[in-house]
């Protein structure tokens, strides 16, 4: 049971990570959100990013390194899980 839960959460975070990465890349290509893929990525990630975005400016006024730290954490955690 715990192995299933760990695998499920790991897959969920991986999918969410790639959805956020896809949203970032799509924002450079389609900033207005006209493409269907951009809208789907927005619908998937906005419930997570919306509350974070509302807290971030107040809690961390200088947030330039947070994206880098999240990427670094993701790949470090992935190496630990996959060995």
Image (cartoon, helix red, strand yellow):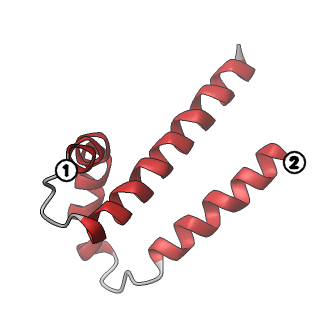
x, y percentage for residue 51? 24, 53
> Which of the pair 22/48 is nearer the observer?
22
Give the left or right position of residue 48, taking residue 74 as reference. Answer: left
Residue that appears at 25% across and 75% down: 57
Eyeballing the image, is 24 above or below 81?
A: below
Residue that appears at 62% across and 37% down: 10
Give the left or right position of residue 9, taking residue 76 as reference. Answer: left
Q: How many marks?
A: 2
Residue that appears at 30% across and 40% down: 44
Q: Secondary structure at mark 2?
A: loop
Q: Which residue is mark 1?
A: 35
* Few, some or many residues within 10 Å of mark 2 (<14, 14–19, 20+): few
x, y percentage for residue 53? 25, 63
x, y percentage for residue 63? 37, 80
Give the left or right position of residue 69, taking residue 67 as reference. Answer: right
> Which of the pair 61/9 is nearer the observer?
9
Mark toward the viewer: 2 or 1? 1
Circles 2 and 1, Cβ within 8 Å, touching? The answer is: no
* Few, some or many residues within 10 Å of mark 1 (<14, 14–19, 20+): few
- The quadrant in which residue 36 appears is top left
| Furthest-right residue in this view | 83
x, y percentage for residue 80? 80, 51
| Furthest-top residue in this view | 1
Looking at the figure, which quarter contains the N terminus?
Answer: top right
Q: Which residue is mark 2?
A: 83
């Amino acid at each position: 049971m715990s192995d299933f839960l760990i695998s499920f959460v790991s897959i969920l975070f991986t999918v969410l990570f790639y959805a956020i990465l896809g949203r970032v890349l799509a924002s450079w290509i389609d900033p207005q959100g006209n493409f269907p893929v951009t809208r789907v990525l927005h619908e998937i990630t906005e419930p997570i990013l919306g509350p974070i975005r509302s807290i971030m400016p107040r809690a961390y006024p200088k947030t330039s390194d947070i994206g880098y730290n999240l990427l670094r954490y993701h790949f470090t955690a992935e190496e630990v899980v996959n060995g």
